[in-house]
Image: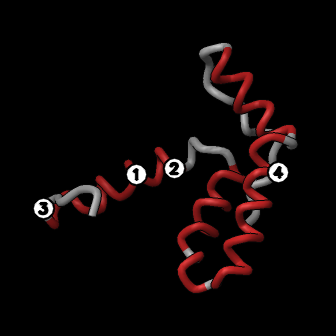
Amino acid sequence: VNKVVPHAELETVALQWGAEINKKSPTGQRMAKFAMNLVDDGLMGQQVFAGEATRLAYMTDEAIEGRDAFLEKREPDWSSFPWYF
């Protein structure tokens, strides 16, 4: 549990969290979803995830944009990366 809110505020807070998540890179969102499912994937699935996460973190144009945006203290531009899941 990250936050407890009254029922009347639930939709507003959920939409705020969704908007914050949507600011993240498409691959970052996919990997977060994949990580949530690791508990059911067993050791082999966890090893595949670790290898893929390392590759994505260092060897993709999306990773380079994230790093450069951080170093340049600007918001990243994810518009050239696909949002498919």
Instruction: Quote the CA–CA distance across marks 1 and 3.
Output: 15 Å
Q: Position of residue 75 (x, y in %)?
A: 61, 25
Of the two numbered discs 3 and 4 on the same chain, state the one appearing first in sequence: 3
Residue 17: mark: 1
Does the residue at mark 1 contact the one at mark 2 (Cβ under 8 Å)? yes
Q: Which residue is label 2 attached to? A: 21
Identify the secondary structure beneath mark 3: loop
Residue in front for this viewpoint, 83 or 46: 46
Of the two numbered discs 1 and 4 on the same chain, state the one appearing first in sequence: 1
Amino acid type at circle 2 is: Ile
Q: Which residue is label 3 attached to? A: 6
In the picture, the quarter occupied by the C terminus is bottom right
Identify the secondary structure beneath mark 4: helix
Label 4 crowd bin: few (<14), some (14–19), many (20+), radius 10 Å: few
Q: Position of residue 80 (x, y in %)?
A: 83, 40
Amino acid type at circle 1 is: Trp
5 on left or right of 78: left
Instruction: Quote the CA–CA distance across marks 1 and 2.
Output: 6 Å
Q: Looking at the image, what colour scheme do you see?
A: secondary structure
